[in-house]
Image: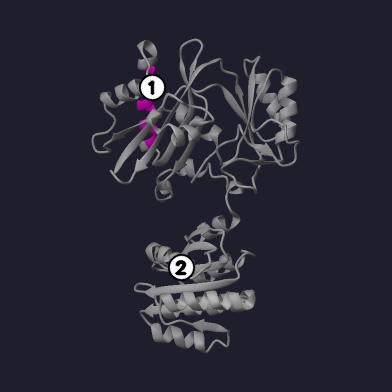
Amino acid sequence: MNIHEYQAKELLSKYGVGIPAGIAALTVEEAVAAARQLPGPLYVVKAQIHAGGRGKGKFKELAADAKGGVRLAKSIEEVEAFAKEMLGNTLVTIQTGDAGKQVNRLYVTDGVDIEKEYYLSMVVDRATSRVALIVSTEGGMDIEEVAHSTPERITTITVDIATGFQAHHGRAVAFALKLTGELNKQAQKISKQLYEAFVALDCDMLEINPLVETKDGNLLVLDTKMSFDSNALYRHPDVMALRDETEEDPAEVEASKYDLAYIKLDGDIGCMVNGAGLAMATMDIIKLNGMFPANFLDVGGGANKEKVTAAFKIILADPAVKGILVNIFGGIMKCDVIAEGIVAAAKEVNLQVPLVVRLEGTNVQQGKDILAGSGLPIVAANDLGDAAKKIVAEVKNVA
């Protein structure tokens, strides 16, 4: 789960992390009121969307030369003007894709006199089962280019979760940032604070870009992104309350209500599978046969009829879907339960696209009998290879 920048900063401030003063706003009037509460005379007006690259982004509704989603305002009047331009309009960045995201929230912060920008992030390194601190002296909007063109400017430091953050980790961060004196001490302190927040909140990613050195010699978190391990959210109801469903794909939001693992993709064949590994294999074999999956959808190992019906509806709600492949290996999941869900959903939504079903495992014959007796144009498949060939052929025939 992702949250907005202002929410992440509020969480980090509880761990002592230094951040500029700022206030969130949902309306132009709230943005102006926020600016009046800040010291000024410089303000930063920041669009709040779940995507990076806001500073270089473009608004669909504004002129091509209009400024991006992060703007420096030199007066209250400019704050008001920028808020009017941003709110309700669609910001397109390198991470949103061409569709962009509508800006529904702003974050108005106090301006900062910047001496130098740095980069610091933390992620779960699954290869080492550690937390990886990724550090660079080249922070700011061009960090992706730095990673691509000059990777030697990026340092990775790993922390064993069993022993936790040690003093030498902080020194390694400060050394990588080439900081000395008081700034060196601040870097050690802030990296420890960020690590503590990362672990305590069950984050899977925490990015500070930029971490800035101010003209008066302080380190401040100027921008941050934070995401959390969804499996651990039950331990953090306060974090769960920060979820903004307007930033998520509506189908993914609907899927989460039924505890379905669903991710929309760009293809045209919908997939319903039980088990992540089988889902990945199913998507691969669809591509091997010349077409592309429209989604990743794992119904899990213990789905009931209602859950399967919901999954089917979610797939069919995507207008890009031209055919559906159901691939179920029944262990805990029973094939007859899957079959009942498929039939119920197909009848309820008035199925208009080809459907190929491959069932194997517990109660497989009962499942096949249910499908065969449904009166629906369901194509049965013997194995995964057969299923992929049949759904691709069916979609091409319709086209």
Secondary structure found at label 1 = loop
Q: Residue at x 64, y 47 (%)?
A: 98
Asked where in the image residue 355 lies, by quadrant, the reply is bottom right
Report crowding for label 1: few under 14, some 14 to 19, many 20 or more residues within 10 A (C-alpha): many
| Numbered circle sitting on residue 177 | 1
Residue of label 2: 288
In the displayed structure, 363 sits above or below 276; it is: below
In the displayed structure, 161 sits above or below 327; it is: above
Give the percent coordinates (x, y) of residue 145: 49, 34
Q: Amino acid at mark 2?
A: Leu
Secondary structure found at label 2 = helix
In the displayed structure, 13 sits above or below 130; it is: above
- Of helix, strand and loop, which mostly describes the magenta segment? helix
Asked where in the image residue 32 lies, by quadrant, the reply is top right
The magenta segment? 185-198
Q: Left or right of 257: which side holds 30?
A: right
| Numbered circle sitting on residue 21 | none
Residue 349 is one of the magenta-drawn residues: no
Query: Which is more toward the observer, 246 or 188?
Result: 188
Query: Which is more toward the observer, 70 or 250?
Result: 70
Give the percent coordinates (x, y) of residue 356: 51, 78
Q: Amino acid at mark 1?
A: Leu
Asked where in the image residue 353 lies, by quadrant, the reply is bottom right
Give the percent coordinates (x, y) of residue 119: 44, 28
Q: Residue at x 52, y 25 (%)?
A: 222
Q: According to the image, what is the colour scheme of the structure?
A: one colour
* Res. 9 visible in picture: yes
Give the percent coordinates (x, y) of residue 205: 42, 40
